[in-house]
Amino acid sequence: MNQILLKYRKQLFCCFILIVIPIVLINYFYLFYTMDLNYPISYTGGDDFFLFVNAKNVLESGWVFHNDFLGAPYGANNYDYPSLLLDNVDTFILKILVLITHNVVLSVNLQFITIFPLIALICYFVLKAFKMRDWIAVSGSLVFTFTPYIFFRGMGHFALSTYEFIPISVLLLFWVYSDDKLFAFNKDFFKYKRNYYAIIFCILIANNGIAYYPFFTCFFLCVTGMMKGFDKRKLKYFIQSVSAVIFIGILMAINLIPYYINIMNEGKIELRSYAAAEVYGLKIIQLFLPMTTHGIGILNRILTVYNSSAQLINENRSSYLGAVGIIGFIILMFFAFINKIETDLGKKLKFLANLNVAAMLLGTIGGFGCVFALFISSMIRGYNRISIFMSFFAILTVCLIVEYLYEKISKKKIIKILFIAISIAFCCGSIYEAFPGGVPNYEANKVKYISDDVFVKKIEASVSKNAMIFQLPYHQYPEGGGVNKMPDYQLAVGYIHSSGLKWSYGGMKGRRSDSFNYQVTNLDVEAMIKTLSVAGFEGIYIDKSAYTDEEYTNLTTSINKVLNIEPMISDDNLLVFYDLTSYNKEYLSEYSEPELSTLKDDILYRLNFTLGEGFTAVEGEGDSQWMWLSNDAKLVVNNFSDKDKQYHLKFRIASTSGEMSDLKLYINGKGTKYTLNVDGILIDMDAKFKPGKNTIQFKTNAVQLVAPGDPRELYLRITEFDFFKNETILK
């Protein structure tokens, strides 16, 4: 043991430095030493709440697949959110922390703090693999740890802040390019130690970065394979690269097994549009534009002009490379145009330059990322996030050149010391410059957190142990967007602060829980309260910030007329709770047990309609809603009860042309033929749906409507439909 410590004493000292310095710097930047880590670092109601929800779910249920306390009355499944199923390394770390602390907020805070030394340590070992001196590897690691990207993402986009495996992705790319033995499937495969490292790398890559980082890695592997194949004029070298892609793909597919099983059982829902790939694309100019000017006048003027007039400015602001990154980027662009390179350093830089160009071609607005989103899959949308790979390419470039220059400079010790001092000073300046400034108001977060906690604890004391609480307004989960002054995930307050209560918010959008909440919310207030009473809810929770003053007054006036009670109000006057206990006792007494059982079955096990392949989203409002269909579209009908259910189908469907065309309507394979044109026909029929998944299929030979700028397949238009309405008749 002593010999090992002696042999690696320099590396161990560097590791110690890379644990201490990031923790010191993160405390310096964020002033964590001034706060109590038992309260949230970030408490905005945005993606930080999404992180709290996942942490609490891991603590209570063991993992992120299912949550019995969200999406009431049915519970919530996360199988439709594949990104969540692909972030297993960070979820595993979070699980360890919550098991140790039994404190959701503390665990989330600790995970955020520890990600900085973790990035630094992994980056250090990768830079050492490129044969760099310790001081260069340490400096480069710290610069990559404290990028503008991580300061922008922070806890709000924590799954993207955890980019610790990007350095090993780049090392894997370099090995594939330079090592013919790697992933060479022959009798010596398991004798070659580097293959074991590569397998471990692939496992880590596939389980990090909510699909983005493994996707980008696979893209770069394909580019690497093409480069090597063209250089050596042999197909086997491209196959070598593809082997790594296939292995990562298999690992991701294994993670997504629950997702595909869920699709088979309940049909597929589209969570994202291809257009988002354009909106959240990479803008090359933003690689050079800092997020803050640090008081430099000319920079402030440039940023003000650009940010006030340019289009599509959003999270892509995080693409800024920082001072060191910009130098490396410029060097790589220079090497991208050089063909004849003989030196080892030149070949490495040419390799990184080609990867850098490929990153721009994929990520830039209107680039190949948009092509992929349009023709293959829209699940990857934030192509600006490839900038963190470009950041590492650039930092690695600078480190390689600094290593080369250090070798070539004068052998005088004073000159070498001066060179080291200047290099380290520049790195320190780059780290300081990367921090955009601004520290969360920890005291305000604490006050808000305590206010919410006290309010939810009062709700718990007023209802039964596992009571269901209905939440207003109706809000889709996940990625529903903010409403008025209510942030996207603000309704998760109830779940975060409770123990055992079941909340209506949090069911996957487009699924059973979401459909129930949408239907109930769209009833008039009296019918809504009666429906909730029969369904077993014991209270109504309202977030005032989602409403205008007029909307809130109208809502509460209507509720007060029905319940005739004073609501419970939080200390900050933003949350309101109506206890339904007394009302339930009185109203439900009007029904006999058999009547109540039938009503409850009708409410809780009503048919769930999900738009499948070929359907567009619902457009319009109120009675003026419509949907477009392709020439082969499917409506998925889920019957969650254990018996057949009758349903009266009624809707109007029309083609886009005056010419008559055929429509074949299949219900679970049994078809009926109709003819229609632009005037449309009324479909009015009874249908029986068996337990489980059912399909209504629409097939037509109608003419497609071609709308300029609209890539959708528009063949048929449905109006006057009631698939998503609640028809239960209550006393």
Image (cartoon, grey):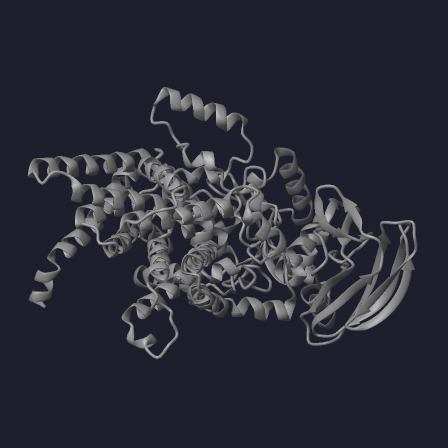
Foreground residue, 284 or 578? 284
Which residue is pictured at 63% across the width and 59% down the height? 269
**Residue at image point 85% right, 49% down:** 656
Q: Quarter of the image holding residue 227?
A: bottom left
**Whether residue 581 is situated above or below residue 354 in the rendered picture:** below
In terms of depth relative to the viewer, which is nearer, 645 or 502? 645
Residue 456, horizontal then vertical, whole percent: 47, 51
Residue at image coords 56%, 55%: 379
Q: Is any atom of residue 540 visible in this view? A: no
- From the image, which quarter does the C terminus lie in? bottom right
Image quadrant occupied by the N terminus: bottom left
Q: Is residue 473 left or right of residue 194?
A: right
Residue 651, placed above or below residue 687: above
> Residue at (16%, 56%) from the top-left corner?
11
**What is the x, y in percent for residue 528?**
69, 53
Q: Quadrant of residue 427?
A: top left
Q: Nearer the viewer, residue 423 or 512?
A: 423
Q: Is residue 16 left or right of residue 458?
A: left
Q: Is residue 536 above or below residue 576?
A: below
Position in image of residue 189 (x %, y %) = 34, 75
Q: Is residue 597 visible?
A: yes
Near-viewer residue (130 or 624): 130
- Image coords of residue 229 (percent x, y): 44, 60
Task: Residue at the far bottom: name it.
Answer: 187
The number of discs equals: 0
